[in-house]
Image (cartoon, helix red, strand yellow):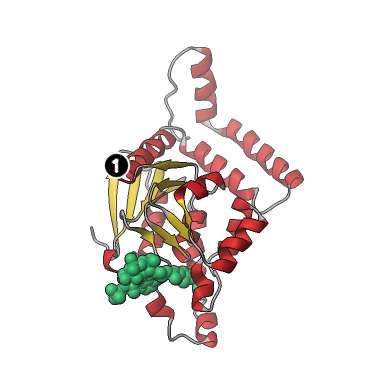
């Protein structure tokens, strides 16, 4: 791997990205975020890939932004460098992204997981926004995405207390789609990612974009947005192929056109 803070592996049509700062609980330093942005952008443009899995190690997905890097910064500095703004780049990736969370997903680590399209948790996963314990608040969309994922009372509870929730609680809250034994998590996640990657890429991108848009706009505009996206699938070869294959009782063969 040509990266310092992540490992990237091709698994069939899936790109597996692993955070690789084990001694720092995968704290998300500037260098790591730069590498993540660079590689996700490359994968998005590479037709060999249909989906992305992001994971950490068995102890930590990521324990947040790098506190040691932030410690001495001043208000004018963080404003001037637009600290954390580039983290949002992940939300511009068109291919579906699944976060596979074992261990700690805290602060910025949790926020990054919430930018992904699906979250699966290992049985030992712990999610939290402990920024208040450091005298600060979430800065990568944590407050905004958590309330949309779990509702106001739970979002307030988690963020105001800084306490962690475990995998089962996260499942009950609807924050994650399933809980898997720690050692199976990455394989289970790769299976789903491979399935997603087996379909038409432009269609998957439309589904991802349309569902994510629901968090930005109201129902009436959302339904309109969806319908336009739906109509646009009629401009694709893959829509013709999918429906023809059904009628002809054969397997479709996607061309991503
Ligand atoms: C820098 C970190 C770190 C972090 C852990 N480490 N988290 N370094 N930034 N976010 C380092 C520790 O300093 C330590 O380094 C090594 O990783 C191992 O961590 P320990 O604390 O010794 O491990 P353990 O006792 O097992 O506890 C694990 C832990 C704890 C519960 C995850 O490390 C922890 O509470 N981390 C901080 C979590 C946090 O507050 N995250 C939010 C960050 S703020 P040494 O050198 O001592 O071995 C944030 C804001 C984002 O994300 C956006 C808004 C600003």
Q: Quadrant of residue 184?
A: top left
User: Quick one: 162 or 204, which is closer to the camera?
Assistant: 162
Q: Is 114 drawn above or below residue 229 in the view shown?
A: below
Q: Is 105 drawn above or below residue 249 in the view shown?
A: below
Indicate left or right for 121 with 229 as reference.
Answer: left
Q: Position of residue 217 (x, y in %)?
A: 70, 52
User: Quick one: 232 or 196, which is closer to the camera?
Assistant: 196
Residue 81 in sight in this render = yes
**Residue furthest to the right:** 220
The residue tagged with tag 1: helix, strand or loop?
A: strand
**Residue furthest to the top:** 248
Q: Position of residue 31 (x, y in %)?
A: 35, 70
Q: Is 198 drawn above or below residue 7 in the view shown?
A: above
* Quarter of the figure with the N terminus: bottom left
Residue drawn 36% across the image and 36% down it: 191
Indicate left or right for 235 with 70 as reference.
Answer: right
Q: Position of residue 93 (x, y in %)?
A: 48, 53
**Residue furthest to the left:** 1
Q: Is 29 drawn above or below residue 194 in the view shown?
A: below
Q: Position of residue 112 (x, y in %)?
A: 47, 59
**Neighbour tally class for label 1: few under 14, some 14-19, many 20 plus, Cα within 10 Å:** some
User: Quick one: 170 or 231, which is closer to the camera?
Assistant: 170
Residue drawn 31% across the image and 53% down it: 58
Per the image, the residue denoted by label 1 is 11
User: Quick one: 231 or 27, which is closer to the camera?
Assistant: 27
Picture quadrant of ligand 1: bottom left
């Amino acid at each position: 791997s040509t990266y310092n803070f992540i490992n990237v592996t091709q698994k069939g049509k899936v790109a597996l990205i692993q955070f690789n700062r084990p001694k720092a609980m995968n704290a998300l330093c500037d260098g790591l975020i730069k590498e993540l942005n660079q590689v996700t952008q490359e994968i998005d443009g590479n037709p060999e890939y249909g989906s992305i899995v992001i994971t950490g190690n068995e102890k930590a997905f990521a324990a947040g932004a790098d506190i040691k890097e932030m410690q001495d910064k001043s208000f004018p500095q963080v404003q001037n460098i637009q600290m954390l703004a580039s983290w949002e780049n992940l939300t511009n990736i068109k291919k579906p992204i699944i976060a596979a969370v074992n261990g700690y997903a805290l602060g910025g680590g949790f926020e990054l997981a919430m930018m992904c399209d699906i979250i699966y948790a290992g049985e030992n996963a712990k999610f939290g926004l402990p920024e208040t314990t450091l005298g600060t608040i979430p800065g990568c969309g944590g407050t905004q995405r958590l309330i949309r994922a779990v509702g106001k009372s739970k979002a307030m509870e988690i963020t105001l207390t800084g306490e962690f929730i475990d995998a089962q609680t996260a499942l009950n809250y609807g924050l994650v789609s399933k809980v898997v034994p720690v050692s199976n998590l990455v394989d289970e996640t790769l299976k789903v990612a491979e399935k997603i990657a087996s379909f038409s890429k432009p269609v998957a991108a439309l589904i991802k974009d349309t569902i994510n848009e629901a968090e930005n706009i109201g129902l009436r505009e959302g339904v309109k947005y969806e319908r336009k996206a739906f109509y646009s699938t009629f401009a694709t070869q893959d829509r013709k192929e999918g429906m023809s294959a059904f009628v002809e009782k054969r397997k479709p063969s996607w061309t991503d056109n």
